[in-house]
Structures are given as structure tokens and as C-alpha cells.
Image (cartoon, grey):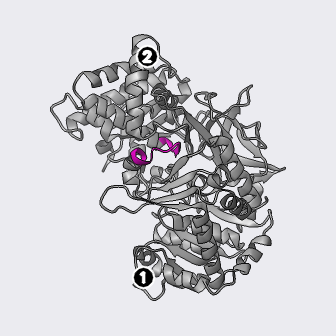
Amino acid sequence: MSTIPDIFFDRAGRTPDALAHAVNTNSDGGFTWSNSSWKDYADAVRHVAASLIAAGLHPGDRVAILASNRPEWIHTDMAAMTIGAVPLGIYATASPEQMEYLLHHSRARLLVIETEEQYQRIAAHIENLPELGSIVLMPGSEPQSTAITSWDEFLDRGRAVPAGDVDRRRSELQSEDLGSLVYTSGTTGPPKAVMLSHGNLVETAHMGAQAIESQDGDRALSYLPLAHVAERGVSLLGPITAGYAVYFCSDLENLPRYMRNVRPTIFVGVPRLWEKMYEVIRSGLNDARGLRPRLARWALSAEAVGNGKRSGLRGLVANSIIAPSLRKKLGLDKAHTVISGSAPISADLLMFFAGIGIEIREIYGLSECGGPAAFSRPGRVQYGYVGEAFDGVELRVAADGEILIRGPNVFPGYLDDPVSTRAALKGGWLYSGDLGEIDESGSLRITGRKKEMIITAGGKNIAPRHLESLLSDHTLVHDVMVIGDGKKFLTALFTLSKSGMEVLTWDMDSAWNSAEALEAAVRVIKEHVDEVNGQLARAEQIKRFSILPAPFTEATGELTPTRKMRRSYVCQKYSHVIDGLYSEKVGRHTSYVSYDACVD
């Protein structure tokens, strides 16, 4: 089968009564799941596909989707591919300007939204989007503007389309046809539109089955943005090959409750989520009183974690009493496949979770190869490495350290951007822009990004991600960014974790955000920096640091929707702090430069 709709309808035909999707319909804080089978899923896709045809969509036309995680997103995505149209996702947090750029650049003909507010965000820009012919509102609210078509009206128009028209469109699809557009995060400029063919997506779907090793009754949670290639793989591509059910969580704030209720057997997270889970566990244990929390603190102490294995009484307590309880509280007591992707995760976090019986396996990839390229096999997790290439994928490292990828999942190019396409694809290899190493067993280690490489005034090439990984490995640290391009030495900008500060000030007679707490945090961070410096070559050591007043967020501009750091923006926003770190007025042996001292 050479297209995604072929695999999808084959799955629906083989397991029509199996659970495909589940949505929580309880609005009072509880859980009442509305289930739909693979037959229901297929019927919905056919109906939406007919409605897209009725709306005038032709093969190659773009269909943009802006919504939280819900079945209608998946139905629209699959339906668009079924009739030869090209779906693309827009992050729910996108600004009006970002929305206009994506809709204009993609030449979207139809936009599906979830709320009237989303329409209001783009309304003032509609005149700049002459190719956008229809805006459809998903069920849940009635449109207030005449420019919007309700979901019911949209579906009603599709009833007039003969069923054979959908089948004919599907039968005409070819493996090399464009299957979807995925926009990059745009950390260094405008987002680029990654073109993925049906053949690319088919390979990605099969790779998902490789990574998951599915079992009967498997279920996954859909909660990361569906505009991201990783969640689309989990929620749309993976199920059609592996056959698991998808439970939708549309509100990230309630994710812990959803996890405890659903108890997914397959769970994919990002490093920041694992960090938050760790912080919650540590904070809870530190705050709690009584014998059981004391036992947990003792059994899970840092020196006991080691490589995730314990022995003796400590091991007995951790493995038989503490770990099962923690896994259940996290909602991961039934999980057999737990994956981390999107960004590097620290070895200490991997070891901690291994210590409570959760083996987190890493996946490495990028949008340009449909998502996955390498992954850690079960039982073969190697801390500091993201694993080996998927079957059918080749990896190698160029002379300058750049990771190259070759395989049937590699994209044909960027939309309307031949210059970037030529830079990314050379001699059949995808030049990833990532730096790494491959050991004798074929395991890949990521060391940084080429574009992020720091070249000091002394000519030393330094990959900041490795240093940031070491520096972020502390409960007080929320974000860290290493500075030093063109400078005589390296410095760092830190932001503090609220939960870490609360633990730090537990025995102090002051609030976590008081001046006294900050002074204590500075001392602890300095000790941490000194400890990390002891592991580094002289040119890599952090000579000075500052603590910023607030964490990095997407809303304040420092992060992309996928939590990638916008380094140039951070440098611009905090240029006065960076200038202060390199000021000649700072004493030679001063390591901490306060934020306030840098403000005019």
C-alpha cells in the first residue's frame, strides 16, 4: 500500500469494531468517554472528504487546520489526504501575523477552526488571503460571522457528493503525490514548509509500528500540538499501522488527570514534561511528612538511583513499595512503551525514571524526514545516545560533525524554496543541521546544532547544547542559555524553577520569590556551575552567569510552539544583561552578575 488512505481504510476494514478514538464529554471535571470504532472513524473521514469535494477542493489544494486535539482534526487531516488535497496544521497559540503567513505561504483554500475567537484573530488579515475560499467551524459552538460555515452545514453539503467521487480521488493517488505540509518552528527566520509525500508518510507510519511494538488493548493520549510532526505521528500515522486507540486530551493543564484516568500503554512526552514530573515527585516527597515519604526520599536518593538499578534493602523498598505507587500516581503504571522526543533529555532524568521502573526511550528525527530517524530499542537504552537508525534508514556523520540521513522517509524539498532545498539535500542525503557522533554499535549521540555553534574570540568551536544539558540538570534550573559567540569567555543566562525554589526555601522563613530566596539560589547555582565547570575543558567553562526574572515561554517570545529556544530573540531581549556579563567594570573573579545591576 503506497498511500496513507490505503493503509487507513485497510485498517478500518480489518478491525471495524475495535476502539479507534475516545473523547471526554464530561464538562464537570470528571470523565465520561464517548468511544468511536474504526468503522465510525472511516465513515467520518468519508463524510468529511465528500464535504471537501463539495467545497470545491481539488487535488493539491491546501486545507489548514487550527484546533486543539480532537477527532475532527484527525478526520479533516485524513479526509484531505484521501481526496488528494494537502493538510497543514497551525498551532492554536499562533499570532494573527503567524496565521496570515502560514495561510498565505501555503495558499490554503480552506481553513478549519475550533472557536469564533480564532476567526477574530485572522479576520483583519482575510483581505490579504485571496485564495482562502472557506472557513469552517468545528462542532461545539455556532458561528457568529456570516464568513464562517458551521460544521453541520459543511457536512450537509457533502451529502450531495456521490460516494464514488471519494473512492475515485483516492484511487488516483500516487506514492510520490504531496501528502502534507509541515512548517518548521522558525527559530532563525520565517518557517519553512516541509513537503512530505504519501510515500514519506507511509514510511513514517511503519516506523511508528517499529518503535511501539503494539499489544492488544493499547491506548495512547493525544495531547501535544497536532501541528507538530511528532503528535501527528502518535495520533494519526501510528494507529493505522499499530492499531492502538487514541484518547484525546484537549486541555494540557489537565494532562495529569487524564493520564491517571486513561493509564496509557503508549506514551510520548517531551523533555520539559519529564522535568515537570520529576519536579512534582521531588517537591511532593520533600513537602510530605511521615514514615512513607521518609522511606521514599531514602530509597530514591540521588546516590541510590545510579544507573537505575538498586540492590539490598533500598532496592527492595524502592522496587516493591515506592516505585509502583509513583508509577500509578503518574498514570504510567500500565505503560510498556514510553518515549521522549523533540529535544535532548538529560541522562539523570532517564536514570531517575528507570529507577522507578519507567524505561524512557528516545526518538530522534526532524520534520524533513517525516519525524523519526533513530530510536532506542527496548532494553538497549544507552544514556546520552538517542539510539540506532530505524530499519531502512541510513545515518552517517560528515567531516564537520553534521548528521546526514538517507532513506525513503526523507522529504523531496521545501515549498517554493529551492535555495533551502539545495542546502538540505545533497547527493541523496539530508543534511540535518544537527551535530553528532555514531559509536561502534551504531548508536547516535546528538552534540548540538550547526547554526548554534559558538566560536569564541579565541577561535574555539563550542556546541552550547551539551553545556546547557549539563547546566540544566538541577532542580532550581528552569531554563539556561549559554552565551559566548565572538567573546573571550562563556557566560550563561538562567531562569529559576518555582517548584525548585519552593523546595529550597522549605526550611527558610521567607517566600520562594523573596530577596533572601534569590540570594540562596545564587549560592546554589554558583556551586552547580562550579561543579559543571569541573567536568569541562577551560574554553567550555562558564565564567559568569545571571539569573533572569522570568522563565522562557512561547507567550513572551523566547520559545517556539515546540519549546525550541529562539536564541537570537533572547540575545536581543536581554542584550543589556549580556552586556553586563561582559562589562569590564565587573571584577575579574566575579561569577554572578545580578539582573538589576544590568538595568539602566
Where in the figure is residue 499, as x and y percent of width and height?
A: 31, 38
Query: Which quadrant: the N terminus?
Result: bottom right
* Magenta residues, start to end: 259-271
Q: Is residue 86 magenta?
A: no
- In this view, the residue in front, 258 or 101, is 258
Asked if residue 590 can be seen in this view, the reply is no
Compared with 241, 132 (above or below) is below
> Residue sitting at 75 percent across and 43 percent down?
404
> Residue sitting at 59 percent across and 38 percent down?
362
Which quadrant of the figure has residue 43? bottom right
Q: Amino acid at mark 1?
A: Pro
Q: Residue furthest left?
A: 509
The residue at which mark 1 appears reads as: 143
Where in the figure is residue 51, as x and y percent of width and height?
A: 61, 80
Compared with 530, 120 (above or below) is below
Tag 1 secondary structure: loop
> Residue sitting at 46 percent across and 39 percent down?
332
Where in the figure is residue 200, as x and y percent of width and height?
A: 74, 56
Do labels 1 and 2 touch, CB within 8 Å? no
State how far apart marks 1 and 2 are (Cα): 59 Å
Asked if residue 342 can be seen in this view, the reply is yes
Q: Amino acid at mark 2?
A: Gly
Where in the figure is residue 153, as x and y percent of width and height?
A: 51, 84
Q: Nearer the viewer, mark 1 or mark 2?
A: 2
Classify residue 272 as left or right of residue 465.
left
- In this view, the residue in front, 255 or 466, is 255
In the rendered structure, which disc, 1 or 2, sits on the residue that comes first in sequence? Answer: 1
Classify residue 290 as left or right of residue 487.
left
The residue at which mark 2 appears reads as: 315
Classify residue 356 as left or right of residue 590.
right
